[in-house]
Image (cartoon, rainbow, N blue to C red):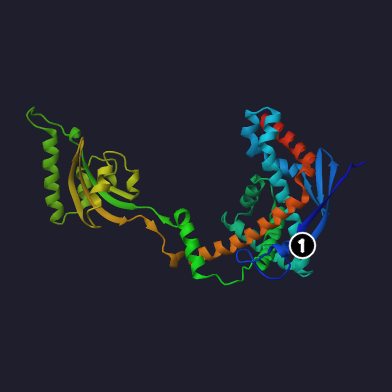
Amino acid sequence: MCRRISLTVSMLLLIGGCQSDKSGMTDAELERIALTQRIELEQAKGGLVLVVGGETLTSDEIIASSVEHFKPLAQASELERFKSQARGQLEELVMAKISNILLYQHAKKQAGGNIDEALEKAAETEYRKFILEFGGDEVKAEEKLKQSPGAMDKKSFMETQKRSMLIQSYLGTKSSAGRPITYRELIECYNDMKGEYFSIEAEITFRLIDIQPGRFQVTDPNQDRNELASNLAERLIIRLRSGEDFGELAKQYSHGHRQAFGGLWPSVHPESLAAPYNLIAAAVERIEPGQIAGPVVTQGHVFIIKLEAKQSAGYEQFENVQEQVERKIVLDRRNEVFDQLNAKLKAEAKVERTDEFVDFCLEKIYQMGRQQP
């Protein structure tokens, strides 16, 4: 006989009306419309199950997706300390799962009865795209799915896609996604994003003749290896200025590890050059591609440098990334609506009513985390 604990959750959802400036949802709309679902806690074989509007959320699902995340804490803590520190995050996960189920149910209801076929086709398209990431090898793609949290297969992948697409579509209609995006919004978002997403690192490509005095063999004790290296460098610069090929001379005279490649150092970030090669970065700042710098004399080296290409640090131009910025704004609007709905759900659901479910999951996660190497 199953023991049931009944919980009533009121999920406030936007279905129309005026829009706020940021998210397209007003407090009045949040307060006006309620979707009430019955949530029941059931004992099942080997675990617990939350039944949310007829759908199930199993303890196995929560545990499987959380063990790896909490394993370091489990291995470093006693049970009570672990439960105290992990509880908040696990409650957030459980409530996010519940709100996702409720939002999907409401979105599907609002979409009407003809949505299933369209969702199936769209999910099939996403699955084919996923397979293409593995060169069209469906076996490899399915193996990757099995390794994902929850050990997915094609069926569960497509179900996840259908739910995600329907929810995003629904949120799009409720989050003022159709409201025109102003140029000011675009520029503000671009400035917020550019440091993380659109930065361009400084980069140089150059050829190097690396003459190392210590590599010279001398028979006359009066000969100075440093002087020999400097004299060779001066002669090579004269030959280069007369039109000889830098790469060929590098193959003949360079002692550097890129000698066999004609001294070519491709796509180097200047700040990554350690001493004494950091002197190269300073030298090429003063020349343009195609020009030669040197000789640059330092302890154990005499450098002759030819700059092949140079890219200064900066950011992608706004015009080149405008579409990405627009997508980010639309996504932020939808996420803001979802966060409002989720926050309202948590307030109405009273998270402490799921304590038994969360406690059970925490104890199992702790046990499994301690067992795994």
Q: Residue at x 58, y 58 (%)?
A: 132
Q: In which quarter of the image is the N terminus?
A: top right
Q: Where is residue 237 in the image (x, y as percent from the top left)?
A: 14, 49
Q: Position of residue 13 (x, y in %)?
A: 74, 62
Q: Which amino acid does label 1 sit on?
A: His
Residue picked out by circle 1: 106
Number of numbered discs overlaid on the protein picture: 1
In front here: 117 or 329? Answer: 329
The extreme front residue here reads 28
Local secondary structure at mark 1: helix
Vertical order, 253 against 335 (above or below): above
Report whether 83 appears left or right of 304.
right
Q: Splitting the image into 4 quarters, where does residue 18 fall?
A: bottom right
Q: Quadrant of the C terminus?
A: top right
Report whether 301 appears left or right of 362.
left
In front here: 216 or 25? Answer: 25
In front here: 108 or 12? Answer: 12
Report whether 292 appears left or right of 191.
left
Q: Splitting the image into 4 quarters, where does residue 242 fall?
A: bottom left
